[in-house]
Amino acid sequence: MPVPGPIHGQGDGAGPGGPGSSAPATPPLSLPCRSLWRRHHRPEDPDRFLQALRDEARRRRAQGAEALEFHADACVLDPRYAVPAPWAEAAAILAAEGLAATVHLPYAWPDLTALDAAVWEGSVTSVVTALRATAPLRPQLAAVHPANHATQALVQATPAADRPALLDRLAARLVAALRRILAEAPPEGAGAVALENLEGVPWPLFEAVCREAGVAVCLDVGHAISNGDDPLVLCARVGPRLRGVHLHDAVPPPVPARAAPPMAVQPGPPTAGRTPPEPGAGAGRLGRAHLPLGAGHLPLRALVAVLRGAGFRGPVVLELDDEEALQASAARWREAASS
C-alpha cells in the first residue's frame, strides 16, 4: 500500500522558497474550474469543456491561481469523464498555461463510511475510477471526503450517548476504504490522496483514521472552525502529514450563555499561547462555513504564517461558489500571502 510522504519541500526547488532563495515559500493557490460544469451536478460536454478551459485557465492565472481545482464528481455523473482521455487533453492545456491541478474526489453520492456493503463497495469503486481517470492531471492534491451529507446528518441526529459507538463503526469502514483506494489507485493519484476533515467528526478520531489508513491530511480550515476547532493548532498537530488546505471562512458553533468560546482567534504569534480547544468542541452543534474570507473568524495572516513556518508548499484550494466572493477572497489571500 503506498503511503503518502510529507508535502513539505515538495517540488524542484524553483521559485520563492526553493534552494538558493531566502524568500519564504508561499503556498500556491488553486481556484475552481467552472467550465467543467454546465450546471450544478451536470457536467459540460467534454468537447465544450476543453474548448473553454484555455480561456478560463488564463483568467484564473490573472486572478492569482497557480492551479485549477477539478471536481471529479464529473466521473460519476458522465461516463465520458470516467476515462483518462479528456483529462489528458485538459492536462496539456494546463501545462501550456503554466498551471497545475488539484482534484476533489467524488463526494456528493459516494460514502466511504457506509454500513451498507453494496453502497460501500460502489463508493470505493467510484473514488478509484475517478483517481484512474484524472491521473493524467498529476494532481498536487486529491481530496477525499470521509462520508456524504446523509451520514453527516445521521451523526448529528444521533443522541450524544450513542454517538461514539456509531463513529467507531463508521471509522472502521473508512479505514478499510482508504486502504483499498490507496492500493488500487495509480501512483500519480495515490500519492496525492488526502482525507478532508468534516464537521461532526472529533479531531482525535480523524487523526487516528489517517494514521491507521496511512493517508495524508487535507485540512479544511473552515470546517475546523465550524466544528469548534482551532485551525492554527490543528496545522501544528498535523505537521508533515499536511498535503493540502481547503480555504474558506467560517464562524464557530453557538455556545450556551456563560460558556467559554470553543476556539480562540486572538491576535498574536500564530500558535504561541494558543490553548488547543477540546477537539470537536462543536460536536452536536455546528457553525457556518464556506463564507468569503473576512466574513468569519479565520485569522488569515496568522494561517499564512503558520503554513510558512511549517515549510508547507501547498496547495491551498479556495472553496467558494459565488464568483464575486471568490475573486474578492483570492485578492485577500494574495494580500495576506505577500505580507
Image: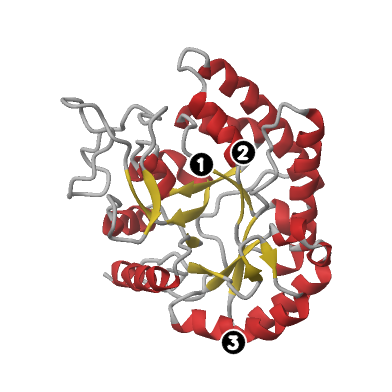
What residue type is disc 2 on?
Ala
Q: Label 1, label 3: how many angstroms apart (C-alpha)? A: 33 Å
Q: Position of residue 325 (x, y in %)?
A: 38, 68
Q: Label 2, label 3: how many angstroms apart (C-alpha)? A: 34 Å
Front residue of this view, candidates 159 and 332: 159
* Residue 147, label in figure: 2
What residue type is disc 3 on?
Asp
Q: Is residue 264 left or right of residue 320?
A: left
What residue type is disc 1 on?
Asn
Q: Compared with residue 303, is residue 184 higher up or lower down, i.e. above or below?
A: above
Q: Position of residue 29 (x, y in %)?
A: 47, 68
Query: Residue at left 81%, top 37%?
Result: 121
- Mark 1 crowdedness (10 Å alpha carbons): few <14, some 14-19, many ≥20: many
Q: Identify residue for label 3.
A: 55
Q: Position of residue 104 (x, y in %)?
A: 62, 56
Front residue of this view, candidates 227 and 236: 227
Query: Residue at left 55%, top 71%?
Result: 67
Label 2 vs 3, first from the N-terminus: 3
Q: Identify residue for label 1.
A: 197
Circle 1 SS class: loop
> Which image quadrant: the N terminus?
top right
Q: Nearer the viewer, mark 1 or mark 3?
A: 3
Q: Is residue 222 left or right of residue 182?
A: left
* Residue 52 appears in the figure: yes
Q: Label 1, label 2: how many angstroms apart (C-alpha)? A: 10 Å
Circle 3 SS class: helix
